[in-house]
Image (cartoon, grey):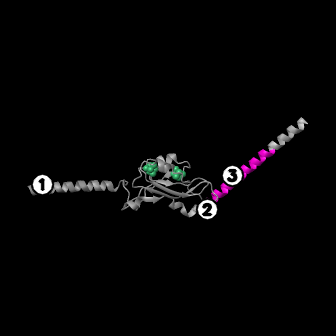
């Protein structure tokens, strides 16, 4: 009697399980086959900080001012930079962030005077050791750096020419006014 009862209970349990499995076979999946399948993140999604392209520059615009380094509560940013020949502002040559320490608080974004910091939309960072979380944010921009410096030199030369032309026009106007005043006195 016990054997029969146990068998019936087991069969009922098996059928219940199969019913649930069958039901879910025809429902849309609620999980994804990561990493074979990549998900589209929502618009509000944000992850680790990155150097973003600044309009008209074709590159980042980190000027090695160190404002982000000073404000960072996790003390996880190290920046090096240099003043390229023919440019007034510096350019960062290294922007190392230890993402094992970064809390993604966003304070560095708030203080950046050139708005060149943003959040990435990556979501699959993983590593086996601390060194895997040390990122140089300049790396993706390194190849285009010379072209960017050239564009900056051209922009600075254009600005200087505009300033010189305006100064010359103002001096000519002043001279003409003084001439006019001298003639009316005579
Ligand atoms: S997001 Fe916050 S913790 Fe991370 S680097 Fe910027 S200031 Fe530091
Ligand atoms: S605050 Fe902005 S411009 Fe200044 S060092 Fe940081 S990223 Fe570069």
- The residue drawn where x is 23% and y is 55% is 15
Which span of residues is magenta-colored? 149-172
Q: Is residue 33 above or below residue 75?
A: below
The one nearer the camera, 107 or 54, is: 107
Q: Tag 3's secondary structure?
A: helix
Circles 2, 1 touching at the beta carbon (< 8 Å): no
Q: Is mark 3 within 8 Å of ligand 2?
A: no
Q: Tag 2's secondary structure?
A: helix
Residue 170 highlighted magenta (yes or no): yes
The one nearer the camera, 33 or 1, is: 33
Q: Which mark is residue 147?
A: 2
Q: Which label's residue is closer to the chain start, 2 or 1?
A: 1
Residue 69 highlighted magenta (yes or no): no
Give the spatial CA distance, label 2 vs label 3: 19 Å
Q: Nearer the viewer, mark 1 or mark 3?
A: 3
* Snapshot quadrant of residue 130: bottom left
Residue at the disc numbered 3: 159
């Amino acid at each position: 009697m016990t054997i029969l009862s146990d068998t019936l209970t087991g069969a009922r349990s098996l059928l219940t399980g199969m019913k649930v499995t069958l039901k879910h076979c025809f429902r849309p999946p609620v999980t994804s086959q990561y990493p074979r399948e990549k998900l589209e993140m929502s618009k509000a999604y944000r992850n680790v900080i990155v150097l973003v392209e600044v309009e008209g520059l074709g590159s980042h615009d980190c000027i090695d001012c160190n404002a982000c380094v000073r404000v960072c509560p996790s003390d996880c940013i190290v920046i090096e930079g240099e003043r390229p020949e023919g440019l007034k502002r510096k350019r960062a040559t290294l922007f190392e962030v230890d993402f094992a320490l970064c809390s993604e608080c966003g304070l560095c974004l708030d203080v950046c005077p050139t708005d060149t910091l943003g959040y990435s939309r990556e979501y699959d960072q993983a590593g086996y050791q601390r060194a895997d979380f040390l990122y140089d944010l300049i790396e993706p921009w390194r190849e285009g750096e010379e072209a960017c410096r050239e564009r900056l030199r051209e922009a600075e030369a254009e600005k200087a020419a505009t300033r010189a032309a305006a100064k010359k026009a103002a001096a000519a106007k002043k001279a003409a006014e003084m001439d006019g005043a001298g003639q009316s006195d005579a």
